[in-house]
Image (cartoon, rainbow, N blue to C red):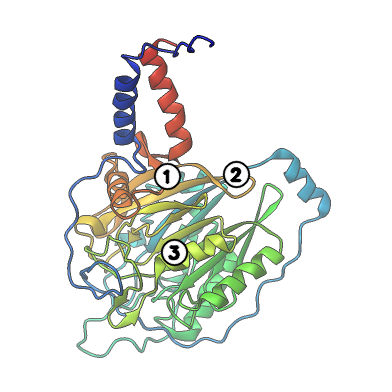
Amino acid sequence: MPPPKTPPYPPSRKPRGLRLWATLLLGLLGGTGCVTPRLPRGAIETTGGEALAPSQPLPSALAPVAPPSSPPLSLLPPAKAAEGAKLGVKLRLRAVGDIMLGTDFPEGHLPPGEANILEGVAPLLRDADVSFANLEGPLCDGGETTKCKEGSRCYAFRMPGRFTGYLKAAGLHVVSTANNHSGDFGEECRRQTEAFLDEAGIAWSGPPGSIAWLERHGRRVALLAFHASPHTNNLNDLPAALALLAQAKRGGAHWVVVSFHGGAEGAFATRVAQGKEIFLKEDRGDLRRFARAMVEGGADVVLGHGPHVLRGMELWKGKLIAYSLGNFATYGRFGLAGPLGIGAILEVVLDEEGHFTEGRVFSTQQVGRGIVLPDEGGKAFLALRELSGLDFPQTGLGLGVDGQLYRGVVEGLRVFKFLNSLLTGE
């Protein structure tokens, strides 16, 4: 009988060391890091999920709009596509949540001197292959709203068309117009918004059937924006959403980004429900089901917004889902107390196959009535780490130090081997 093989370290040290480092590793990585006490719950109705409570709800009202024709789908020249394939390129995306730069309705809600409230964070937005935001309201000079009655407390937004230049100067490449404020001033302002964005070279998606197209590294990038409304690409119509996703893939999209505006709203709406979220008697979507179905249908990253607060993130089949990026730059008419004033710039790096490889969270905050600045205290990252741990504890997404994101299993094995080598001296 051959002698037993000598273990790589003394038996007396092996179990204890493994337990020690495994415990430490789980505490550091554990999917999403340390979990602090649960956030309070309130009274928003959900189906099969936890109760949530509103804070300063924003009414939903959208004017009917005829579906526009989809943009032309001219494919890249074969030689250029082959060049990109040989490079094994990656796509670096930076995304933010809601942007509303100030409204001239009612009077008194524009920044002093019509200042650019994005100036303090523009360098972070410019430093990306693709920068994305949700445009929370129309860019328009004119139009009329039917949302507001005399004497009512009403939220209808209208950014002056000249503010489009601030979006361009900040480095935004593509925006979503699929939300509950894009129709605040009717069809005229929808069309003006699209014209202003086109003139600035900013791609957009929102109306039914619309896909935003970009070209990066010799590849086509498609963005599909959804909201819980039939007047936009509708996240509550899953068959139609999947059909639009398939259309983007057929149109030559190498990377597909999906954006959705959904869920309950307010300071206590930080948790992702199991099942549908009902807010103001409206079906705001079954967001877990929608986002995961988009990934399984071919989306490479899914970006959420709408609750006006941050929500957790998860990896689903190797693809990142961020359920809400919160308020980013919302001047004048938004409550900004507590979590409502915390935002984030989310960086996501996708490999050639569209899988998440790494990322980072840049924390931001709004000061005064809505001037957005970097937050050196990192409140957004800490909130995302907590919320991701609460709602998606087994996700495999690691949230490390300094806002870094990584695939937890891969990075965890690397760290484990390193720590174990220190323990064993090997």
Position of residue 64 measured from the top left corner of the image (x, y, whole percent): 48, 88
Counting other residues with Cα less than 10 Å from the Cα at mark 1, is it few (<14), some (14-19), or many (20 or more)? many
Residue furthest out toward the right: 79
What residue would you read off at disc 2?
Answer: 351
Q: Nearer the viewer, residue 81 or 413?
A: 413
- Mark 3 to mark 1: distance in Å? 27 Å
- In the rendered structure, find residue 396 and report the number of the disc placed on it: 1
Which amino acid lies under the numbered mark 1 shown in the image of this protein?
Answer: Gly
Camera sees residue 135: no
Circle 2: element type = loop
Camera sees residue 167: yes
Quarter that holds the C terminus: top left
Q: Nearer the viewer, residue 249 or 12?
A: 12
Q: Earlier in the sequence, mark 3 or mark 2?
A: 3
What residue would you read off at disc 3?
Answer: 134
Identify which residue is drawn at 82% across, 53% down: 78
Identify which residue is drawn at 39% across, 71% down: 286
